[in-house]
Amino acid sequence: MKTLENKKVAILVENGFEQVELTSPRKALDEQGALTHIISPQKSEVKAWDEKDWGDKFKVDVPLTSASADNYDALVLPGGVMNPDYLRVNPQAIAFIKSFFEAGKPVAAICHGPWTLAEANVIRGRKLTSFPSIKTDLINAGANWVDEEVVTDQGLVTSRKPDDLPAFNKKLIEEIKEGIHNRQKQMTA
């Protein structure tokens, strides 16, 4: 049974995202009937990082300049080191991320992906996890950082690394099924 039919999910990436952190959630969402779109500041294609070297190129479905959170039910933020580092200095990317929180829509970030959440100023008072090397950045942004496989807080799903993807994907799907999280909206006010 496909439980996410008629749901649209944005996956925001820049060059250097960790390949499996896009492909695994995308496959899980597709299997549940969701429509996924790769959103990027890049116009036509974006290049993955695959553990220790460049990975595959992926078609950009919607350029960031044309994307609106109004058209999506949820947002996925893969990690990799370069990807969130590029995104967090892009004002349009940060505004796109913040708009999901303002609308109370589920957001899922893995590995280094939560770096962008710190920049968007949406994690103060939130419980979350990430790759350990950005722990201090997230704590300094007001987060309650924990070292757990997957953490869910009012529609925000976070995980630490690719090994956590099965749990991350399961919680992502659950949060999208639940829909709008009004407490998520309240925490951005």
Image (cartoon, rainbow, N blue to C red):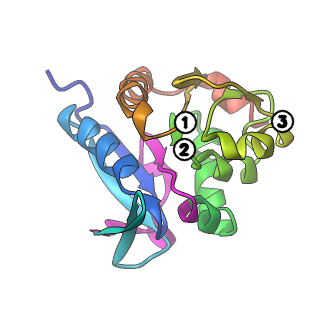
Which residue shows up at 22% across the image and 31% down it? 32
The image shows residue 184 at horizontal and vertical percentages of 65, 29
Tell me how far mark 2 sits from mark 1, CA to CA.
5 Å
Point out the residue furthest to the front here: 52
Callout 1 environment at 10 Å: few (<14), some (14 to 19), or many (20+)?
A: many
The residue carrying mark 1 is: 160
Amino acid type at circle 1 is Arg
The image shows residue 132 at horizontal and vertical percentages of 66, 39
Amino acid type at circle 2 is Cys
Which residue shows up at 58% across the image and 56% down it? 96
Which residue shows up at 42% across the image and 40% down it? 162
When the figure is inspected, residue 140 is found, relative to residue 157, above or below; the finding is below
First in sequence, mark 3 or 1: give its number: 3
Callout 2 environment at 10 Å: few (<14), some (14 to 19), or many (20+)?
A: many
Question: Does residue 67 show up magenta in the picture?
Answer: yes
First in sequence, mark 2 or 3: give its number: 2
When the figure is inspected, residue 184 is found, relative to residue 115, above or below; the finding is above
Callout 3 environment at 10 Å: few (<14), some (14 to 19), or many (20+)?
A: some
Marks 2 and 1: CB-CB under 8 Å?
Answer: yes
Tell me how far mark 3 sits from mark 1, CA to CA.
18 Å
When the figure is inspected, residue 140 is found, relative to residue 45, above or below; the finding is above
The residue carrying mark 3 is: 142
What kind of element bears circle 2? loop
The residue carrying mark 2 is: 111
Which residue shows up at 36% across the image and 56% down it? 19
Q: Relative to residue 139, is residue 85 drawn left or right? A: left
Amino acid type at circle 3 is Gly
What kind of element bears circle 3? loop
